[in-house]
């Protein structure tokens, strides 16, 4: 009998963040610290990504032609800015509820992001290629850290 497939998913954490999904885009809600921190983090990602790929970080769309993956994207707080900077973005989250919130917000503001309710291991199995992989505030919520970072 084949060994059961290992998973990074902690069902309790998925349930907990699904229950908070409506809060993702509320700058004064449960995710207020992320909203406060996001401008600094976005500037760092922009500057480091531009340097890595020989791009001008001051350009309107320095990530044009690059493919980004945001694992554990939640409501899309990083996905949308990366898409605005020109990246083709896949936002992945184990919570289908988070993905629905992210899709709705992206549609409301007119940003194109390929949001998927999926796991890191499913994406790895699919063999898709990305230029940049973002993984922010996720590792502490997974069931199998070794598998997640492998």
Image (cartoon, helix red, strand yellow):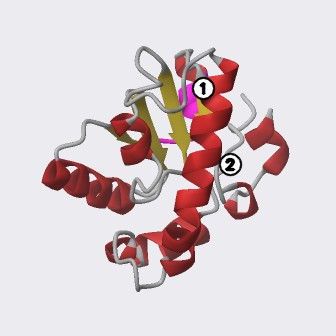
Q: Position of residue 114 (x, y in %)?
A: 32, 34
Q: Position of residue 83 (x, y in %)?
A: 37, 36
- Magenta run includes residue 135: no
In this rendering, the answer to whether 66 lies above or below 34 is: above
In this rendering, the answer to whether 73 lies above or below 21 is: above
Q: Where does label 1 land, which residue? A: 50
Gap in angstroms between the C-alphas marked 1 and 2: 31 Å
As drawn, the residue found furthest toward the right would be 146
- Magenta run includes residue 118: yes
What number of labels is visible?
2
Q: Where does label 2 land, which residue? A: 8
Would you identify the image quadrant in which residue 100 lies? bottom left
Whether residue 117 appears in this view of the structure is: no
Residue at 42%, 70% in the rendered image: 18
Q: Crowding at label 1, few (<14), some or many (≥20) Cα neighbours within 10 Å?
A: some
Image quarter (top left, top right, bottom left or bottom right) of the C terminus: top right
Q: Earlier in the sequence, mark 1 or mark 2?
A: 2
Instruction: Give the side of residue 134 with respect to residue 86, left or right.
Output: right
Q: Nearer the viewer, residue 80 or 4?
A: 80
Q: Position of residue 53 (x, y in %)?
A: 63, 16
Residue at 78%, 51% in the rendered image: 144
Residue at 59%, 72% in the rendered image: 12
Instruction: Give the side of residue 149 with respect to residue 83, left or right.
Output: right
Q: Nearer the viewer, residue 71 or 15?
A: 71
Are the residues tagged 1 and 2 within 8 Å (C-beta)? no
Would you identify the image quadrant in which residue 1 lies? top right
Q: Nearer the viewer, residue 12 or 32?
A: 32
Q: Which residues are magenta?
A: 117-124
Residue at 46%, 42% in the rendered image: 92
From the image, state whether disc 1 or disc 2 is nearer to you.
Answer: 1
Q: Nearer the viewer, residue 115 or 97?
A: 115
Disc 2 secondary structure class: loop
């Amino acid at each position: 009998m084949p060994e059961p497939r290992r998973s990074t998913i902690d069902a309790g954490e998925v349930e907990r963040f699904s229950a908070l999904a409506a809060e993702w885009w509320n700058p004064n809600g449960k995710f207020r610290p992320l909203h406060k921190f996001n401008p600094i983090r976005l500037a760092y990602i922009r500057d480091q990504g531009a340097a890595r790929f020989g791009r001008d970080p001051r350009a309107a769309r320095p990530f044009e032609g690059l493919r980004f993956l945001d694992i554990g994207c939640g409501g899309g707080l990083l996905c949308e800015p990366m898409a605005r900077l020109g990246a083709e973005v896949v936002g992945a989250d184990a919570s289908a509820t988070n993905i629905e919130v992210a899709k709705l917000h992206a549609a409301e503001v007119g940003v194109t992001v390929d949001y998927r309710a999926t796991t890191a291991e499913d994406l790895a199995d699919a063999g898709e290629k990305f230029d940049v992989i973002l993984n922010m505030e996720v590792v502490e919520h997974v069931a199998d850290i070794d598998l997640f970072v492998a």
